[in-house]
Image (cartoon, coloured by chain):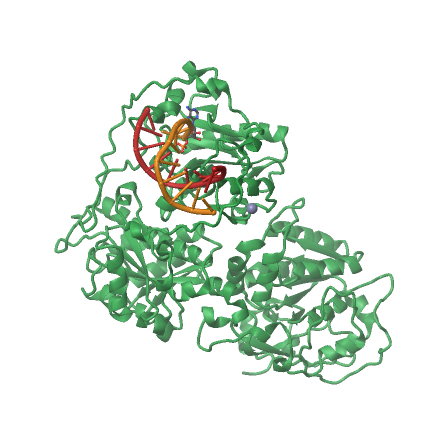
Chain colours: A green, B orange, C red
Amino acid sequence: MPECRYGSLCHRKNPEHWLKFSHPRTIHFQADSSNLLHGRLHISCTSYGDSYGHRKRMYKLNGDVSSLQSTGPMTESLNNVLLLLVGLPGSGKSTFCNKLMQSSPQKWKRICQDIISNGKRGTKDQCLKEAEKALCQGFNVMIDRCNLTIKQRQEFLQLATRISAQVHALILDIPVKICIQRAMQRIGHEGGLEGKHAPAAVQRMAQTLERPAEVEGFTSIFTCCTADDIERAFCMYHLDTQGDHRNNDNDKNVSGNVTGERVCGTSLGSNKYCTHDDIRKAFSTHQLDTQQDYRNNDKRVPGKLNSETEYGDNFSSINSSDAGFRTLAFPSISTSDFQFDHEKAADIIVDVASNFLQEFKGLGLRLVFVDLKENSDMLTRVRQKSTALGMRSEEFMVIAGDITKLRSSSKLECSFIANATNWRLRPGGGGVNAAIFNAAGEGLEIETKKRVKTLAPGSALTVPLPASSPLYMNEGVTHIIHVLGPNMNPQRPNCLQGNYVEGSKLLRDAYSCMFRAFASCVESQSDQPVNQITNPCKSKDKQNAFTILMQSAKRKSWTVDNSMKAKHHRQTTGQQEAESSMKSISAGESDDTFHKLELDGAKSTAESQGRSIISKGEIQRPSLSTGVSKVKQGDAWTEALRNIALHPEHYQNMTLKVTDQAVVINDKFPKARKHLLVLSRMDGLDSIKDLRSSHLALLYHMQSLGMEFVQAFLKEDISLVFRMGYHLDPSMRQLHMHIMSQDFDSPSLKNKKHWNSFTSTFFRDSKGVIEEIEKMGRVQPVDDESSLLTMELRCHRCRSVQPNIPRLKKHIHTCQQPFPAGLLQKGFLIMADNENGKK
DNA sequence: GTTCTAGAAC
DNA sequence: GTTCTAGAAC
Ligand SMILES: Nc1ncnc2c1ncn2[C@@H]1O[C@H](COP(=O)(O)O)[C@@H](O)[C@H]1O
Ligand SMILES: [Zn+2]
């Protein structure tokens, strides 16, 4: 390839030019070139493994560094610079920016997306606007956001071109593990990325990194791998108009080509400004291997993409569960032997997958659709449809290959493989099922048999592979998720005889259960010690290791061995908290009038449940009925709310507000200082499981009624935080939304069930319910619903486990931890500031 | 859902 | 002996 005569100084942006001409990475600054930053600086990288978990790189810089020594010209030429910081959360972008802002506030403007909107997170557009404004006002501008991908940077480069600004990239190439550690430890982060949610998020982001390249249009690219590098970068960009703090003793030009490598890191926090010597040192030769820098813990196993073995022991606890993506490889369900229509199936796959990825984004989950042959019909269809839908290729891949040999033949690390099984979960039958049972060895059959004997169409069963399984040893697969799809083949049992309404529903269920089983396993793994993940069958807690999921309550009656239930180990009990101290705090709105409530007795008109208990071992017949709630009926007490909702006029003394669709009352047994109920007035609607899109108007109405009251409470007491939502399985009839202050400071909160019903995923936030119905048409089932109310007591803020209710109460009384970031992000917490509250 | 209380856990 | 939970009865 001919060399472009400008080499890496070439300004052309046309990609064709870059394809036609080579641009040698070594550049030679002319002795008279005013300075490094003014010219084009390119740092070449020689791959040998890097901090983002793949390769390290050795940076070489050839250039005349004379300019680096003369502070004058550098200062002068450094104007009209748009500096894009590129780095993971925790890489030190903001620290760098803040330091630069402190040292040269007259010259620089920091634009930080996390706080651009009056101290809150804003948009890229806002950043662009602000950047343009500041540049036009004569400032240099730092863009303090991650800027990891070409796309994320593109518009800033376009802006720079448009207004003829220089655009520099400053890459903070700090190892992922360091970033994670920092992100986990920090508190009060502007962007809220901190604590236990940080590892997955940071890992996921690390995977998306696309290194800034000149071809994008950068005037300069500078990479920092050590604290010293960062200091150096600081020196380069530091523009102190008051006078230069830096050591000027070494202002003779030192010219000549210097091959550069980094030196040991020093603390960025130190106020040491670079001397010219420092700068020369920066480009003097050092061997990375011999240096003690951030990277010396990396022990990479060659040939692996992103497995647990990627990192050294020191870091295994973080990386083992969150190393990059967690991947599920899955075959097409029901389309071969069960003869499901391919077009319909492909639509369902991409639809369910994209909804799933949307819902679980942030967990670092990846789905890989696998088919044996490159030219297979399903592969082509799924590929086309997922591309057309714009699904992100990092999260959703379509590949041809043997699903049991993904690592060895495709270098794809998949811990989870879905199996299109038969209803008896037996090996054989040809196709994927035979291949997987075969590859996994008899351990899979044994582990599967231990759990269930049969599987219903539209459901999934997760089975951890024994550590001795060849599939685990050779391919790194830790779990098989068995799935049974609908059968359209008259030659096979349970043929749906062309009923694609039911068939499609079941196929959706099948994929949805498969994906959820995957997600739930990944989520539960993140709490487990490493050895339980890498050796799945050693897991004591079988409920973490396998999950059976059913889409509807009908199929929920499908039972799972109780022996599999998580053993709940209690810790020792300390002294009990005095009940009286709880009583002294009035539990909000509790009111004597409630105690006068008369129950109308059971006057239920609703049809009986009609849910047949399906015993294990029976072939599951798909059902066409849609009623899925199982709110108990018949007992008088279950009707109390219903009576109020249907006859609010009889209960005027207790209704706080009555509209045509809903009634607001105080909870008779408040579980927090503020605890109201918004009762729907719709007869026959008892549970969120019965909700469909036709109920959306009602849900919005109930939510806005709730908001009215919350706002009023917040006016009274700015410190309160609220959630509004539904119990997944309410005990009382009549759909009702809880409005709860998050203090849980009430004597009526007495037991584990109370606590878990408001703090586990048993509590479904109104906003989330509405979103699920809008997107999926119904509320999505949770994995392992039965254990939600009996699981251990955890503080709703810091998630620490508490041994019993009195201790829990004592703990939450003083726990100051922020609420889990997920709740904030999803907008489930409503507070005075409303920073992350509902719309 | 709550109340009540036996007996497990401490 | 006291505290706490869980399950039966309502
Ligand atoms: N008679 C009643 N009047 C008002 N609230 C009640 C009454 N009985 C129970 N509750 C509350 O209604 C809620 C029903 O819970 P759930 O059915 O699980 O959503 C609980 O918070 C109870 O405290
Ligand atoms: Zn806490």
Q: In front here: A514 or A27?
A: A514
How far across and down, in percent of the image, does residue A203 sit? 52, 62
Seen at 41% across and 34% down, the residue is A696
Above or below, comparing residue A36 to residue A388 in the picture: below
Seen at 76% across and 68% down, the residue is A235
Above or below, comparing residue A685 to residue A797 in the picture: above
How far across and down, in percent of the image, does residue A47 sit? 55, 78
Give the position of the C terminus of chain A as an image quadrant: top right
* A311 left or right of A524 in image: right
Seen at 42% across and 14% down, the residue is A649
Above or below, comparing residue A83 to residue A290 in the picture: above
User: Which residue occupies the extreme bottom position in the image?
Assistant: A256
**Total numbered labels placed on residues in the image:** 0
Give the position of the N terminus of chain A as an image quadrant: bottom right
How far across and down, in percent of the image, does residue A451 sit? 27, 56
Q: In front here: A689 or A276?
A: A689
Seen at 85% across and 77% down, the residue is A251
* A709 left or right of A618 in image: right
Q: Would you say residue A616 is visible in this rendering?
A: yes
**In which quadrant of the rendered view does residue A179 lie?**
bottom right
User: Which residue occupies the extreme left position in the image?
Assistant: A491
* A599 left or right of A605 in image: right
Q: Would you say residue A828 is visible in this rendering?
A: no
How far across and down, in percent of the image, does residue A358 sit? 44, 51
Q: In front here: B4 or A134?
A: B4
